[in-house]
Image: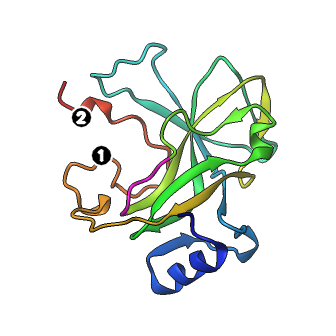
Amino acid sequence: MILTDAQILECMEKGSIKVEPFRRECLGTNSYDVHLGKTLAVYKDSVLDARKHNLIESFEIPEEGYVLTPDNFYLGVTQEYTETLAHVPFLEGKSSVGRLGIDIHATAGKGDVGFCNYWTLEISVKKPVRIYSGMPIGQLIYFSVEGQILTPYNKKNSAKYNHVTAQPMESMMWKNQF
């Protein structure tokens, strides 16, 4: 079941959902709009290796915006820090963003119960498009969970993305054993 606006607000009052900064006008009927942060990153190497720590270069989006191109892959970050302690958060792109040919995630739209961080965005575009820090970029949808959670994400020793940062985070695939 997807939470409604009233249920999201109730959960925020109880502390099981947190969005900072919270703006009431960003609360939709059954979602919360998030915005593009000021930092983007690109991988330093043109060929990525799943067994290697692939390093990124970060830069701030200038006031006049930044043109994303289809020949590159970008990591972005949300302006909002979120905590979701009792629900499964899903991050989806806004339809207005999709209609500009911007994809905000390749595969990682679902968070885990216990995810407490900024969201790293996996951005690709179909054609060149100018983007701006602070623009609406996606929406969080919260799903109810049935059953007991044994280990929330923020308590897992093996969780690779628990380091809280307002910077885009590169892939930590290299930490897996394979």
Q: Residue at x 82, y 43 (%)?
A: 64
Q: Is residue 58 left or right of residue 124?
A: left
Q: Position of residue 32 (x, y in %)?
A: 65, 64
Q: Vertical placement of 97 versus 46: above or below?
A: below
Q: Residue at x 66, y 66 (%)?
A: 30
Q: Residue at x 33, y 55 (%)?
A: 162
Q: Position of residue 156 (x, y in %)?
A: 22, 57
Find the distance from the CA under tag 2 to the CA under tag 1.
Answer: 8 Å
Q: Is residue 33 left or right of residue 150?
A: right
Q: Position of residue 177 (x, y in %)?
A: 17, 29
Q: How is the image coloured?
A: rainbow
* Type of amino acid under label 2: Lys
Q: Which secondary structure dominates the residues rendered in magenta? A: loop
Q: Is residue 66 left or right of residue 38?
A: right
Q: Position of residue 15 (x, y in %)?
A: 45, 81
Please give the residue where the numbered disc 1 appears in the rendered image: 160
Residue at the limit of the structure toward the top, as seen here: 47
User: Which residue is more in the foreground, 134 or 126?
Assistant: 126
Q: Vertical placement of 26 versus 45: above or below?
A: below
Q: Quadrant of the C terminus?
A: top left
Local secondary structure at mark 1 = loop
Residue at the limit of the structure toward the bottom, as seen here: 13
Asked where in the image residue 62 lies, by quadrant, the reply is top right
Please give the residue where the numbered disc 2 appears in the rendered image: 175
Local secondary structure at mark 2 = helix
CB within 8 Å, label 2 to label 1? yes
User: Which residue is more in the foreground, 103 or 48?
Assistant: 103
Q: Which residues are magenta?
A: 110-114
* Type of amino acid under label 1: Lys
Q: Residue at x 47, y 23 (%)?
A: 44
